[in-house]
Amino acid sequence: MAALVRPRDGRRIGGVCAALARRFGTSATTMRVIFVVSCLLPGPQFLLYLALWILLPSEKAAKPAW
C-alpha cells in the first residue's frame, strides 16, 4: 500500500480522493464517485473531507536530476 499523502498530480480540489484512491489501489474517478454518492447520505462526509485536506501532508516535489 502506498503512503497516505496528497499527490501533486491528479488533484481536482484538494487531492484527498486521489490520495485515498492511490492508497487503496482504485482509480481517482471511482473514489470521487463514492464520495459524491456518500454525500447524499446523512453524516459528516464533507467535514471529514476538509479534515483530511488539512491533515494529510502534500507529496514532496521531485528533486531535479542535476
Image (cartoon, grey):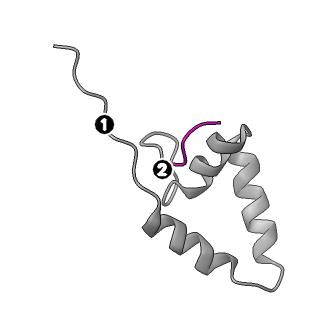
Q: Which of 55 and 42 is in front in this view?
A: 55
Does dot 1 land on a helix, a strand or a loop? loop
User: Does residue 23 sit above or below 48 in this rendering?
Assistant: above
Q: Relative to residue 43, is residue 60 drawn left or right?
A: left
Q: Position of residue 1 (x, y in %)?
A: 65, 36
Q: Does the magenta stretch include residue 2?
A: yes
Disc 1 to disc 2: CB gap under 8 Å: no
Q: Can you say which quadrant of the picture contains the C terminus?
A: top left
Which region shows up in magenta? 1-5
The amino acid sitting under disc 2 is Arg
**What secondary structure do most residues of the magenta stretch adopt?**
loop
Q: Where is residue 7 in the image (x, y as percent from the top left)?
A: 47, 43
Q: Closer to the camera, 45 or 11?
A: 45
What SS does tag 2 mark?
Answer: loop
Disc 1 marks a residue whose amino acid type is Ala
* Residue drawn at x 22%, y 15% as measured from the top left: 65
- Residue 36's place in the image compared with 15, above or below, is below
Q: What residue is shown at x 84% (from left), y 80% (from top)?
A: 41
The dot on residue 61 is: 1
From the top left corner, tell me how far across and down residue 12 is, in percent. Answer: 52, 53
| Residue drawn at point x = 47 percent, y = 59 percent | 56
In this picture, is 15 found above or below 36? above
Name the one closer to the observer, 29 or 61. 61
Q: Distance between the residues labelled 1 and 2?
A: 11 Å
Q: In this view, does 28 lie to the left or right of 41?
A: left
Q: Name the residue under label 2.
A: 6
Residue sitting at the far left:
66
Q: Earlier in the sequence, mark 1 or mark 2?
A: 2
In percent of width and height, residue 43 lies at 76, 84
> Residue at 54% across / 48% down in the picture?
4
47 over 6 or under it: above or below: below
Q: Mark 1 packing: few (<14 Cα in 10 Å), some, or many (20+)?
A: few
